[in-house]
Image (spheres, rainbow, N blue to C red):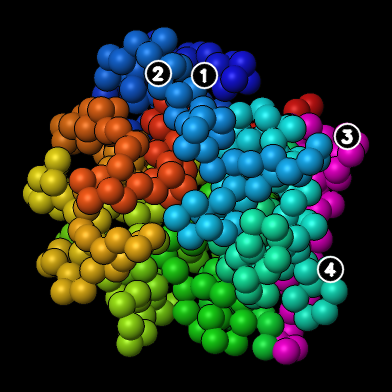
Amino acid sequence: MKQILTILAMATIGLSSCKQENNKLQPWGTGAFETGRYRNLFAEWGYPQAEIDAKLNRIFYNLFEGPEKIYFEVGDSMAYISDIKNNDVRTEGMSYGMMIAVQSGRKDMFDRLWRWSVKYMQHHEGSREGYFAWSCRLDGTRNAQGPASDGELYYVTALIFASNLWGNDTGINYLKEAQYILDCAMAKDGTDGVTNFIHTGHKLITFVPDVKGGAFTDPSYHVPAFYEVWARWANDGRAELWRECAQKSRAYLHKAIHPITGLNPDYSEYDGSPRKTGWIIGEQFRFDSWRVPMNIALDYSWACADREWQQDYGRKIQDFLYGQGIDTFVDQYNIDGSRVTEVLGAGGYTALRHSLGLVATSAAVSLVCNHEKSKEFIDHFWEARHEPYEDGYFDAYYDGLLQLFAFMHLSGNYRIIFPYS
């Protein structure tokens, strides 16, 4: 874990000077693409750095090494991350794991996850070439052939960061692999129903890059700052397109998020209106939706290109959840803030909970907020425990990953990885 501690130490550089020019309740006005600086909100609110270090390492240990781990090595060169409750391997988790690995300086872990992804998940021929089967069994057998667009989004960004950090001559040409995914995606023309994972008309990410799933999007897939990374370092000749995608994605979120509650649906049309699917997932704020506050915090921290709207958003969603009770807000709502009539289950359990994943992301959005409530969200997240709920349900995978990502954000350790040179 030395790599994480090194990054944590870097996060505190310049913190004292930042405090002098930035009140605790005043978000920074310039993003890290320009400044190279990141807020450590835990430290700003008085938590000792040694305790921040220890808690980050403990969360990492629980996910990747402890008895409830989700990371499993295979032979001497591969590894996978499992959604334990569903007993499968998903591109979501694999690409998240690669992002965590590169942020932590763990080349060994990154390479293992990438090799498993390439061997078992990536299509190497046919109309889906370059894409990844979104779900596999633990032995690598595919549960489905089709991709989910957020996997490709994270794979590309993590690979670019790996290229920037480690170069491309240590066994894997990370940049070439990222360009291969992008080039394959951009060449999709609808053959066999397979499309670009970025809708070419709307310039927005699709839910699934095929004729059916490409007709709508998922608000939690929108991470505009990732396109800013591609524009700078993908070197694929599409920099202007990626900048346009970032702008379109920010504008889309304005429309997809409820103007009073700050809640968003799991799925939406490209105009931002909730997607009416006819089944339980679609129009409501449910599991996918939890990621949106964290994604907006990331875009603010890195790019700060939509400052006023994002600050307003952070206030609205924290105000809403705070009004539900800082210790009692639940994890599923209609986007107008009313309680759902049908509860989406997970892992064989069906209940409304005060879920760790949403506790984590609602705290992470404090990076954009300028009200006193943010301190309570941060404190509540700090005290939250990753353990079974009262009904016995335990989500090592999704709750755990969102807990780690949010903690990285709030401690200044979810960073843009600039080219090493």
> What residue is disc 1 on?
8
Q: Amino acid at mark 4?
A: His
Q: Are marks 1 and 2 in contact (CB under 8 Å)?
A: yes
What's the residue at 41%, 10% (across, down)?
50
Give residue 170's position: percent from left, percent from top.
88, 34
**Amino acid bearing label 2:** Ile
Q: Could you tell me which quadrant the N terminus lies in?
A: top right
In the image, residue 274 lies at what x, y percent?
A: 32, 77
Disc on the earlier residue, 2 or 3: 2
Mark 2 sits on what residue? 52
User: Is residue 94 covered in magenta?
Assistant: no
Q: Quadrant of residue 77?
A: top right
Query: Residue at left 61%, top 29%?
Result: 104
Residue drawn at x 47%, y 37% is: 68
Mark 2–mark 4 Cα distance, whole angstroms, equals 43 Å
Label placed on residue 62: none
On screen, 196 above or below 7? below
Q: Secondary structure at mark 4?
A: loop
Quick one: SS at disc 1?
helix
Looking at the rendering, the stretch of residues picked out in magenta corresponds to 163-192
**Amino acid of disc 3:** Thr
What's the mark number on residue 124?
4
Give the residue type that dot 1 points to.
Leu
Crowd class of label 3 (few under 14; some 14 to 19; many from 20; radius 10 Å):
few
Query: How far apart are the two marked residues, 2 and 3, measured between alpha carbons?
Result: 33 Å
Secondary structure at badge 2 equals: helix
Q: Which residue is mark 3?
A: 170
Q: Is residue 217 above or below residue 6?
A: below
Judged by its main secondary structure, the magenta piece is helix
Say if mark 3 contacts mark 1, CB within 8 Å: no
